Amino acid sequence: MPFAKEKGQPAIYYETIGKGTPIIFIPPPGVGHLTFRYQIPLMDQCKLITFDVRGDCQSERSTEPMTMTQLAYDVKRVLDANCVRKAIVCGYSNGAAIAQEFALTYPERTAGVILIGGYFAVKNFLLEKEYKLGIWAARNELMPLLASGLAKNHFIDKQAANELYAEIMKTDPQMLADQYTTGLHYSSEDRLHQLRVPLLLIYGANDHYLQPYQTRFRELVHDVEIVYIQGVKHQVPSKAPHECNAVLREWMRRKQFIPS
C-alpha cells in the first residue's frame, strides 16, 4: 500500500488514480479517503489523490501536539510522494480548513482551491456544537457510535457505508479528538486576502448555517465562485456526487485546468 513517509513523521496513507490535472481531496476528521469514492469518474481528465489524515483510518499515529500547520505539511508530503509540483486542493468540511492552510502556506504548490461545505473559522453556535460533540465522543472512545453515524450520514448504499465504518474504526480516538480541537480553534480570516488563486465554494442548498460564510470569502478573495447543490445538506461529495462532479469539471474547464 502507498504511504508518504518521512523520518520522524507518521506515514500517511494515500491512493492515486487517473491522469491529467492533479487534484488532492482532503477529508473531514475520521472518515479518510473513502469519503471521495464517488469522485472517481473525474479520473478521465484528472490525477485524483485521496488520503487519510494522520491518525485517521490507515495513516499512522503521532505523539506530538497536532496543529493545522502540521496537517497542511502532510498534504505537501502526499503531493511530494506523487511527484506533483502543483495541484488543485479540494477540502471538504474541516478538510476545507486544511486546504486553506495549505494554500496560504504553500502558494507555489497551489493551482486552485475548492472548498465543499467550507468555512474559515468555527464562528456559529451549531457548528461549534458539532465540533464539541465530536471531541466528546472521541475522548470517551465511543468510536462504534461515531463511526456508525458518520458512515450512514455519508452513504445511502449499505456496502459503501459498511466499508467506511470499517475504515473509521481504525482511527485513533485521541488523535481524532485532537483533530476536532485543532479545527475548532482555527481561523484563516486574517490571511484570506493573501489567496491569489481561483476559489470555488460548494454548499448543499440545505446546509443553511454554513452558507453565510460565503460573504466574507467574497469580500476577501479576488476570484471566488459559489455553487449551491440542490436537495442536499452537508454531505455533497457522497450524497450528490453526480452534481458535485459536474460542478468540479465545469469550473476546472472554465479556469483552464482541464481541456474543454
Image: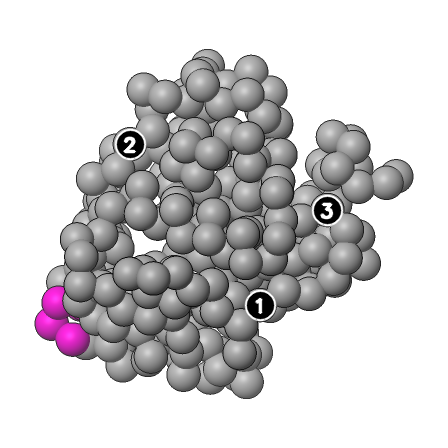
Lower sequence index among marks 1 and 3: 1
**In-front residue for pair 96/242:** 96
Colouring convention used in this rendered image of the protein: one colour
Is residue 103 found left or right of 123 in the rendered image? right
Tag 1: amino acid? Glu
Start-end of magenta stretch: 137-141
Q: Earlier in the sequence, mark 1 or mark 2?
A: 1
**Residue 44, percent across and down?**
81, 58
The nearer-to-camera label among 1 and 2 is 1
Q: Residues within 10 Å of mark 3 (few under 14, many from 20)?
A: many
User: Disc 3 vs disc 2: which is toward the camera?
Assistant: 3
Separation (CA) of disc 3 from disc 2:
29 Å
Give residue 27's position: percent from left, percent from top. 45, 57
Badge 2 crowding class, 10 Å Cα cut-off, few under 14, some 14 to 19, many 20 or more, is: some
Q: Can residue 255 be seen in this snapshot?
A: yes
Q: Residue at x 24, y 46 (%)?
A: 67
Residue at numbered disc 1? 15
In which quadrant will I find the C terminus?
A: top right
Identify residue type, mark 2.
Ser
Q: What residue type is disc 3 on?
A: Thr
Magenta-drawn stretch contains 91: no
Residues marked 3 and 2 touching at CB (< 8 Å): no
Q: Main secondary structure of the magenta part?
A: helix
Where residue 145 appears, as percent x and y from the top left, is: 26, 77
Q: CA distance from mark 1 to mark 3?
A: 16 Å
- Residue for badge 2: 187
Label 3: which secondary element: strand
Q: Earlier in the sequence, mark 3 or mark 2?
A: 3
Q: Secondary structure at mark 2?
A: loop
The residue beneath circle 3 is 21
